[in-house]
Amino acid sequence: MPKGTNQKLKLYYLAKILLEETDDEHGLTMPDILDCLEQYGVTADRKSIYTDIEALNEIGLDVVGEKAGKYFVYHIGSRRFELAELKLLVDAIQSFKFITEKKSNTLIKKLTTLASTYEASQLERQLSVQGRVKTMNESIYYTVDEIHNAIAQNKKISFKYMTWNTEKKLVPKKNETYIISPWRLTWNDDNYYLIAFDAESGKIKHYRVDKMDKIAILDEKREGKEHFKAFDLAAYTNRVFGMFGGEGTVVTLTVKDEAVGILLDRFGKDISIKPSKKKGWSDVRTEVAVSEQFFGWLFGLGTIVKITAPASVVKAYKEELNKLQEFYK
């Protein structure tokens, strides 16, 4: 049998064919495999393919051979990612507002290469990125990478913090450059945030990553380590509504018993829940960042949740409610 032009790549092309053309529902017979190899300029006999399949299994590829009707077929069994896992990742990428539409499509296309051509068609049918609200900042990948590098190097960063103007353009929020110590990255309310220490105010602050521009790693060591020793990221994000800052205060929310799940979903299971004086209601104590965003969240819940303590926050809530009523007169 004359050798093909790509004979040295036989094992590579065999793996490529099996990964792309087979899965649990689709297999290839030995004649099919020989035909596919021939299309890549590789000639082979059955005996050598048996040896090659054994070699692929030895290096970690799960090649399964089994009887299917009157034929014996070969296919890939387990993969690094199962189809259900890839679908989950596709859904997540589509949901992330901080990834642009272009980058989302690029990432999803890369994920399809981890599946067979048949499974990839299922993933592509899932695509529904167009029309979703997405960030327009194409440089977010590199911003995140720089932040990770700064954290790894224990260095401060500088950047311009941007905001939208009425002409739909991102412009600097302030004239000066922000200089902070980066410590954590987190995803919250469909956006990516940097949690950092601001030495000037002596406080932990957060910043939308897609609003950070002209980021640079400085030759200065980070500050604020003592603030992050006992830092609870989950508690911080639960407390800070919409990731807008506010004064951290323990409040009492009185909620209808059938709606207590709303507060558990928002604040987690560590909240204190006790029966209220009024039958069918419970008092929930938790720490929140008191802000307009917090009050707005309460407004949206209507009459099933009300704030009952402390008096200062109750007063502030009523004032915000009065402002809202005046606004709509």
Image (cartoon, helix red, strand yellow):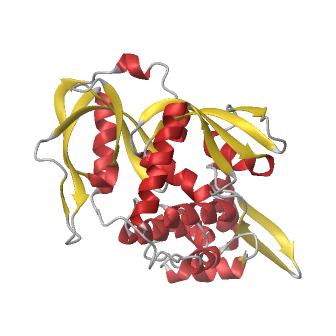
Residue 85 lies left or right of residue 145; in this view the side is right
Residue at 29 percent across and 63 percent down: it is 138
The N terminus sits in image quarter: bottom right
Q: Nearer the viewer, residue 121 or 52?
A: 121
Residue located farthest toward the right when viewing the structure as drawn: 69
> Residue 204: x percent and y percent?
36, 30
> Residue 325: x percent and y percent?
46, 61
Q: Nearer the viewer, residue 325 or 155?
A: 325
Depicted 255 relative to depicted 9: above or below:
above
Q: Quadrant of residue 81?
A: bottom right
Depicted 79 relative to depicted 100: above or below:
above
Residue 176 lies left or right of residue 305; in this view the side is left
Q: Nearer the viewer, residue 63 or 199?
A: 199
**Do we see residue 253 in this rendering?**
yes
Q: Nearer the viewer, residue 76 or 238?
A: 238
Residue at 41 percent across and 38 percent down: it is 246
> Residue 321: x percent and y percent?
49, 53
The C terminus sits in image quarter: bottom left
Depicted 128 relative to depicted 108: above or below:
below
Residue 167 lies left or right of residue 288; in this view the side is left
**Do we see residue 7 in this rendering?**
no
Q: How many marks?
A: 0
> Residue 232: x percent and y percent?
52, 28
